[in-house]
Amino acid sequence: MDSCLRSLTRISISTIFLAILLSSFSFTCTEAYDALDPNGNITIKWDIISWTPDGYVAVVTMYNFQQYRHISPPGWTLGWTWAKKEVIWSMMGSQATEQGDCSKYKSAQPHCCKKTPTIVDLLPGTPYNQQIANCCKGGVINSWAQDPNNYASSFQVSVGAAGTTNKTVKPPKNFTLLAPGPGYTCGPAIVGKPTKFITPDGRRVTQAMMTWNVTCTYSQFLAQKTPTCCVSLSSFYNETIVPCPTCTCGCQNNATHPGSCVNPNSPYLASVVNGPGKNSFTPLVQCTKHMCPIRVHWHVKLNYKEYWRVKVTITNFNYRMNYSQWNLVVQHPNFDNLTQIFSFNYKPLTPYSSINDTAMLWGVKFYNDFLNQAGPLGNVQSELLFRKDKSTFTFEKGWAFPRRIYFNGDNCVMPPPDAYPYLPNAGSRLSFSLLALLMACSAVFFVFV
């Protein structure tokens, strides 16, 4: 009997351990899932367009199928590991950052002989004989929803010491994508349906010899250890201004780590901003209680009979970063009745087609699509006018405030719900009215006396 109990105990412990192990794997796999863009990813298509005596020529294209997450300057960096002993003879539209050891090639020198090449885009202004379509944008790729005409980046690569048929050629492995920092995880290259190309005159269609597809997904947890933005709230019906939570993106520790933030009134501000590390990706933020590079403020401004109005302000506290082509994603149930928006572009996002509660906002080109670094010009703002739906509209219980806000694809930290500006209750309004009445009566009494 005791042996049976011991065996059952071992089985139950083993079962629990296995369940915990499997659940941990499942959490790891869902880190990159974004509920507001469930199908968002960057897809890399590797199209072999012709064979050469010792390898092939391929066109590699990165498609940004993310609704609102783009690749900002200084742009993407793509890497992989060759399956065999391949070399890169030449490239158009991009370049390898290192040539590597090509000493065994006595006559013609390959462009790159590294087993793990690192590829970057060429800059605008590259000579035309080194370009192909969709190249040479400094690695910048816009998001699919914000700029559907510029959501791809391409380059051409001539590969040697590789297979020369579909059966002997091997795809690269261990793809990595920096955009421009970490955050993306790429899967293996999978054989796909050969890509078809239409000639410029539209009268002929050609086909790739072979196509490999690689899918890369983004995780904010991998991109940075701390949040990058926060949200503050206010309203016309309550004097309380709810700030970003303290230490949202870090805490001030200039005493133990000097230079962790900058006082905007410091006489040494210019020297600190332009000093060592000015080209670093590490934010140099203004000293605040929240220590976030970006703050989004949502102010419930006015209440009309049929409408209500909100003011949105985005403030940049980062002295090392200007945000071009920025965007904001806001989730609120009244976006299905958005009537007018001032000085921002607007696009509804409907990942679940029956629900229209998410909006993507971004600046008007040449007007406010550029968010300047921290300082007097480091903010953009707009106002939104909503029509009231009598079946759902209320100012009670924080309904007028957003459920979720993203800036440039990163989730911003919201204040706790119990801190939201509350609507004064009937008791407070009654006491205020009685006080006003007593004061009015007193004034009349003293006038006539």
Image: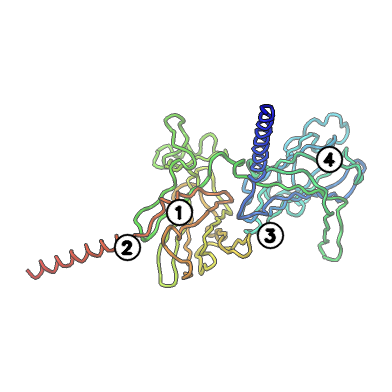
Are the two marked residues, 2 and 4, in contact with CB atoms closer than 8 angstroms?
no
Q: Quadrant of the N terminus?
A: top right
The residue under the point 82% across, 65% down is 202
Mark 4 and mark 1: Cα distance apart in space: 52 Å
Query: What residue sits 57% from the left and 53% below the top?
Result: 326
Question: Disc 3 marks which residue?
Answer: 149
Amino acid type, mark 1: His
Q: Position of residue 157 (x, y in %)?
A: 81, 45
Query: What's the distance in space between the residues labelled 3 and 4, CA to CA?
Result: 31 Å
Residue 89 is labelled as: 4
Q: Which residue is mark 2?
A: 426
Q: Amino acid at mark 4?
A: Trp
Q: CA distance from mark 2 to mark 4?
A: 78 Å
Q: Which residue is mark 1?
A: 297
Tell me: residue 447, above or below residue 329: below
Is 284 on the left-hand or right-hand side of 204? left
**Dot 4: few (<14), some (14–19), or many (≥20) neighbours within 10 Å?**
some
Q: Earlier in the sequence, mark 4 or mark 1?
A: 4
Mark in the foreground, 2 or 4: 2
The amino acid beneath tag 3 is Asn
Residue 130 in view of the camera: no
Q: Is disc 3 surrounded by few (<14), some (14 to 19) or many (20+) residues within 10 Å?
A: few
